[in-house]
Amino acid sequence: MLLEILFGSQTGTAEDVSERFSSMAQSTGVECRVQSLDSIKSIEDLGTHILFIVSTTGDGEEPENMRHFWRLIMRRSVSPGTLSHIHYGLIGLGDSTYPKFNYVAKKLSKRLHQLGAQSICERVLADEQHPHGIDGCVDQTFTGIFWQAFGELIGRELKPRIDQRLPSKYQIQWIDNTEQDLPSLQSSVNTPKIPPGYSSIPLISNTRVTSDDHWQDVRLLEFDTDLPYKCGDVAVILPQCPLPVVSLLAELLNVQNKLHQKFIASNDVSTLSMTVLELFRDYLHITRVPSRSFFEKLVWFSEDERERERLLEFLEAGNMDDLYTYCHRPRRTSVEVLQDFPHTTSRIPFEYVFDLFSSIRPRSFSIASSPKIHPNRIQLLVAIVRYKTIIALYREGLCSNYLCQLQPGTHILMRIATSFNLIDDNRPAIMIGPGTGVAPFRGWILERSLNNEKLNMLFFGCRYRNKDAYVEKDLLKDTINLIYIPAYSRDQEDKIYVQHKIIEYGHLIWEWILHKQARIYLAGSAKQVPEQVSDALKTVFINNGHMTNEQADDYLQELERTKQYQRETWS
């Protein structure tokens, strides 16, 4: 009996949950296969028993590796009843602080029902804001119910065991290194392998554009490349894990003398070849906050009585608070957890690192330049993620801090992807970009200003004009055709944000929409900004277009449907 687990994942969380359920299935003797949804090329590829695990990204959008599948099941040729042979479970992963919470799981559930698929048990819409996080939410509301219902469906009692060690994902074969002079760790820092679709791109400059005394470090990075792109595209970047953490993990796993030794990792479907350094630096996300499955797998190797008892206590259903307090609240990393369990860590066979750690996921950044203004150049505006936890330790975002520390001349791995559909026509453009949300508009405004007939209006938000209004140097020039409306939130006693400025300049916005068919674009955080800007726009329609609340709602929806109002937001 085969259980197929299909995931749609942007940051790797859905894939992690998929691997965890795969381990549960294997511990019960159920054959299981885990695949991303983009591996499904036709309806015929779908099995009979499926567990879907999907996340929601940006403004209620499907993850990139789910989009092909979504188009597949939305085809008009796919009739009701097409999936009547399928029994499925569904886990949605989301964050309730975002307006379109678990939107992708909800619409997938609706479409599966339309096509006749039969649910094994009630779906779960897991919430990152749950007191015990995603894992706790799934376990409390879904895990046990699913295995009981699936067992009844196939006529077997299924009780997953966390203490049963499973075979490793990969088998390892070490390759003898016959070189006399091995390169040092430092000299091999900038030699990552180039995966398919990526190019090795040199950095030209790395400039801080916020003042030195401002809390937020924002960088303007410029790269030399002939990669084709257009305004609105994103640069997709593969970061590296910090070398000090790489060295620490090698020491913990007793492979510090093998950092430059090559090995082959193979299984039935894939083969990898690299050095230990490349594995820890370029491939595995070793600085990530570990999921529940990380602790479950540590139990496999724990023979020290005290450490094993502590691990099992963390995994008891009644102790979810303890695990969350220990791990997620202080954002404790996987390597830090291994440090806390030294006896267990010393017994982990090297081949199991692929089971313990997930792979590094690429990060996308809106391109802030224009190919017409900046030929053979790509510029990025990057806000550095750095914060202090409740245990007074600083945490850093993997990719932003990797970029922050790059020196000119360093090569990084990059590819270009289509993202924001900035329509290149003569209609006026109203752009709303608080913070680094201004990035896709920066190059586009410069490009549109080559034609004086194109009208541009930008609402930009930051805290202080003298500290983080970094676009003004580039855009406030006589040659730039722009109506610039800033919101400096902390330069006065009452905080002022872009939504307040939208209402203040509502008469001008309404005039551009009504008489000039202006297009509206919003870019920025998906957390609160989209809802606040939507409310501000509806207020403009009510005050200046003399609409009722219901009419303003309908009007905004019509602007979205016709692409006259577009949003590019990110988590």
Image (spheres, grey):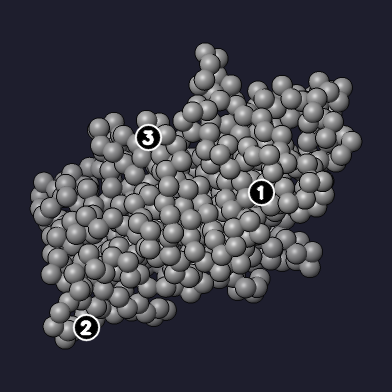
As drawn, is 423 to the left or to the right of 360? right
Q: Mark 3 is on which residue type?
A: Asp
**Measuring 34% from the left and 44% from the top, which residue is drawn there?**
396
What is the x, y in percent for residue 304?
10, 53
Sequence order check: which comes first, mark 2 or mark 1? 2
Q: Which label is found at residue 446?
A: 1
Q: Mark 2 is on which residue type?
A: Ile
Q: Which label is found at residue 212?
A: 3
State if disc 1 and disc 3 touch (CB < 8 Å): no
Q: Which label is found at residue 258?
A: none
What is the x, y in percent for residue 288?
33, 51
Identify the element where label 2 is drawn.
loop
Q: How many angstroms separate mark 2 from mark 1 (CA)?
A: 53 Å
Identify the element where label 3 is drawn.
loop
Would you call the spot at circle 3 few (<14 residues within 10 Å), some (14-19), or many (20 or more)?
few
Closer mark to the observer between disc 3 and disc 2 = 3
As drawn, is 370 to the left or to the right of 415? right
As drawn, is 460 to the left or to the right of 409? right
Quick one: 41 or 497, which is closer to the camera?
497
**Measuring 74% from the left and 30% from the top, which residue is drawn there?**
537
Identify the element where label 1 is drawn.
helix
Q: How many angstroms separate mark 3 from mark 1 (CA)?
A: 27 Å
Quick one: 356 or 2, which is closer to the camera?
356
Would you call the spot at circle 1 few (<14 residues within 10 Å), some (14-19), or many (20 or more)?
many
Residue 93 lies, with reference to residue 487, above or below; the image says: below
Instruction: Residue at the far right: name it.
Output: 515
What is the x, y in percent for residue 382?
47, 47
Residue 309 lies, with reference to residue 322, above or below; the image says: below
Closer mark to the observer between disc 2 and disc 1 = 1
Q: Which residue is mark 2?
A: 175
**Measuring 51% from the left and 72% from the top, which residue is drawn there?**
197
Q: Is residue 273 visible?
A: yes
